[in-house]
Every structure is written in C-alpha cells, then in structure tokens.
Image: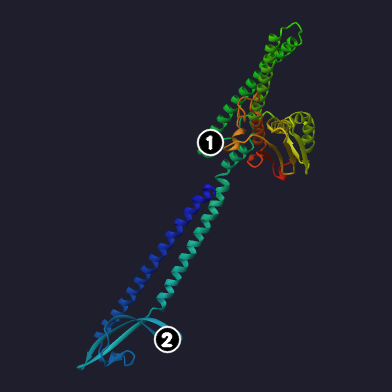
C-alpha cells in the first residue's frame, strides 16, 4: 500500500470516528435540550392554569379528572386520530382546588416535532460527513497525482537506470524541498557509482591483459622445453609439473576474470541463442572425454528454447554444467542431459555428500579438495543465472548418489 493512501486511510478513519462520536453527543444533547424546552412549556402551562379562574378550566374529561393522578412529568404514548398512529407525548399532571373540590388536570405536548427535528439534524450531519469523506478521498487522489508526481518521476528514472551507460542520473529540481534533496542525493550517488564502476572495469581489463600475457609466454616456453630431447628425465618431469601449474593458473585467471565481468555487467550484447543446438554441440565435444572416464552421455531434447543471452555466457553456462558432470561423474555411470522449454537438467552419479549440496555453488568449493579444478565452474553457472534471472537448484538423491543441477529459464514472455 502506498504511503499517501495509508496515511489518508488513518485520517479518514479518525474523521469517521470523531464524526460518529460527535453525532451521538449532538443527538443526545439536542434531545435533552428539546425535552427541557417541552418541560418548561408544560410547567408554564401549569402555572397559568393554576392561577386561572374556575371558568377558564377545561371541561374535557381527557384533561380534567376527579380522581387522583400520579403527579410530575412523564412520557406517554397515545393514539392520535389526526396522525392515525401512536404518538409520543410529554405529560404533566397536577391538582387544582376549585370551590373546595380538588381536580386533577393533565397537560401534554407532542414530541413528534422534536423527533422530526432530530431526524433533520442527523440527516444533515450524515450528509456533511459523507461530503467530507468524499472530498478527502478526491483530495488524496489529486495530491497523489500532483504533489507526489516528482517522487514518481524519480522512481521511474531509478527503475530505468542502467550503470552500463556510464552516465549518472539527471534529476531536475522540484517545487518540494524534500524531493529536491532526494534527487540531489541520488544524482551524487550515481556519479560516485559511475566513477567506481569505470575504475573497476578498467582495473579488471588491465589486470586480465597484463597477467594473461606473461602466462601465455610461460606456457609457450615450457612447451618448448618439454619438446627438448636433451633434457634429463628429472628436469622433464619438473618442467611438466610447471607446465601443469601454469595451465591451472591460466584457467583460474580466466574464470575469475569472467566472474568479475559478469558482476560488473559487461556483457551487454544480447542475441537469441538456440539452446538446443548449443547443448547438442557441447555434448558431442565431450563424448570422447566422457567415454575415456567410462561415462555414457545421454541427451534428451524436448524443446527448442531461444533465450535472449550473450552468446559467450550461454556457451559458458552449458559448458560448465556438462564439464562438471563429466569431471565428477562416477566411472561406469550415465550422465542424463534433458532440455525442455522450461529448464535444462543435468544429472550424473557421483560421490556421496552430506549436508546441503547447494554449498558447491559457492566459489572454490570442491567435492575433492585435492582436485586440480579451481572450483569455480558452478560459481560461474550461478553468477550467469543471477545475471539473467534464471533459477538454479542443486539436488542430491542418496539413492544412486545422483547429483542433479536444474536451470529454470525465464517466463515465456521474457524469452527472445
């Protein structure tokens, strides 16, 4: 619920309660005042009749009685022939002595006019309350559109802001001081973000370039040494170990560089990638490697999703999933790769794990600590899924020690 709507709801609730309490107090106050006025009129009429001569006394039997009556003011309900209904009255009975004889006189006054007056007053009060609530509702809608328009404008710019454009937000000044201060703070914040992002991007690119070149030179020189027949066996073995170390360092460097670029959102290029073709191609490339480990690679494609992705990230996503299954699959088992319009699922038998298997999606997490793998393959998969809004689940079934990775794609409306 919006802030203004929630605030107005409390205001309207408070106004309704106050008007309700005020209406009850006004009703009883008016009723009491009108009854007091009627009582005063009846008492004045008693004083006039008491002081009147005997001939002025009414002869109507409804007004004059020889028998005693309860004295004092009281309420009564009597049938009115003119109204043809029961009408509430206020009555006053009192004794009058004439010629040594005591008569009981009763004077009454109808309360029907009082009830009508109260009804009119309450109707006016309810009409005022309804008009006030309606006017407050219309005023809140108008304020939401006019007073909060600069805030909505700022939100629209924030939602559409893209750091990869290397431009800070340009938010104009507003007639409201608070919104102007907010726009100034957001503008300064985005300026710092753009500067930091640019420095980080340049550092990543420079580091990737400056470190990859020496590594490539080292690998080339070590390859030449390995081909030298004059090397002694001990030296050749040492050179082989150095060459393996540089290769692992190169793979680690490439993986970390890729993660950094993904986090910095440097893959702005988007194409409609046919994932079925990519999965089939990567599976063919890994068939020999899987066969060498005694694994059977089975691919089932029941859909041909075309996802809006960077081609390089799509290839890295599929390659890391399949390579992880081949690398950690138990020899003699079978790797099941299933592609549907909704998800990509890769299942392979592997080592038994305890605890939450999703911890292997973190960086440098490995099933075997002694493995030469850098432990970044699944971390790259998770980073790509987060980048595009995919869902990634790691499931382990103790029966058969089956490891399953599921990548759920975006809804149909957001596919390429």
**247 shown above or below 154:** above
Q: Residues within 10 Å of mark 1 (few under 14, many from 20)?
A: some
Q: Where's residue 140, x and y in %? A: 53, 51
Q: Nearer the viewer, residue 131 or 346?
A: 346
Residue of label 1: 182
The answer to whether 51 appears left or right of 277 in the picture is left
Mark 1 or mark 2, earlier in chain:
2
Q: Nearer the viewer, residue 6 or 320?
A: 320
> Which residue is at the far top?
230
Q: Residue at x 44, y 56 (%)?
A: 14
Question: What SS does tag 2 mark?
Answer: strand
Residue of label 2: 80
Any part of residue 271 in sight? no
* Residue 209 falls in image quadrant: top right
**232 shown above or below 122:** above
Q: Residue at x 73, y 7 (%)?
A: 231
Q: Which mark is residue 60?
A: none
């Amino acid at each position: 619920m919006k802030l203004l709507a929630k605030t107005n709801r409390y205001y309207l609730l408070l106004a309704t309660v106050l008007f309700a309490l005020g209406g009850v107090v006004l009703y009883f106050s008016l009723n009491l005042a009108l009854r007091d006025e009627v009582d005063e009129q009846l008492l004045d009429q008693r004083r006039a009749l008491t002081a009147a001569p005997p001939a002025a006394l009414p002869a109507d039997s409804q007004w004059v009685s020889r028998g005693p009556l309860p004295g004092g003011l009281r309420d009564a309900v009597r049938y009115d022939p003119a109204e043809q209904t029961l009408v509430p009255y206020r009555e006053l009975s009192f004794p009058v002595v004439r010629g040594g004889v005591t008569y009981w006189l009763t004077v009454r006054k109808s309360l029907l006019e009082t009830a009508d007056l109260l009804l009119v007053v309450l109707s006016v009060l309810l009409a005022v309350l309804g008009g006030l609530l309606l006017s407050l509702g219309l005023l809140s809608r108008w304020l939401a559109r006019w007073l909060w328009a600069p805030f909505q404008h700022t939100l629209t710019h924030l939602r559409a802001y893209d750091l990869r454009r290397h431009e800070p937000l340009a938010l104009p000044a507003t007639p409201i001081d608070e919104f102007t201060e907010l726009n100034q703070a957001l503008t300064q914040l985005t300026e710092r973000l753009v500067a930091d992002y640019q420095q980080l991007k340049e550092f990543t690119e420079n580091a990737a370039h400056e470190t990859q070149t020496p590594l490539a030179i080292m690998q080339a020189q070590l390859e030449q040494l390995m081909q030298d027949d004059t090397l002694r066996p001990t030296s050749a073995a040492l050179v082989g170990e150095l060459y393996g170390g540089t290769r692992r360092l190169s793979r680690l460097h490439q993986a970390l560089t890729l993660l950094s670029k993904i986090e910095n959102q440097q893959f702005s290029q988007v194409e409609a990638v046919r994932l079925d073709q990519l999965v089939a191609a990567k599976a063919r490339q890994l068939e020999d490697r899987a066969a060498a480990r005694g694994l059977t690679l089975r691919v089932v494609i029941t859909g041909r999703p075309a996802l809006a992705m960077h081609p390089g990230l799509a290839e890295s996503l599929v390659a890391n999933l399949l390579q992880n299954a081949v690398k950690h699959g138990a020899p003699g088992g079978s790797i099941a790769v299933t592609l549907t319009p909704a998800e990509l699922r890769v299942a392979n038998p592997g080592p038994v794990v305890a605890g939450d298997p999703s911890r292997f999606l973190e960086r440098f997490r490995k099933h075997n600590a002694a493995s030469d793998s850098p432990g970044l393959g699944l971390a790259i998969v998770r980073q790509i899924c987060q980048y595009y809004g995919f869902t990634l689940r790691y499931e382990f079934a103790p029966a058969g020690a089956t490891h399953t990775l599921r990548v759920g794609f975006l809804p149909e409306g957001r596919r390429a």
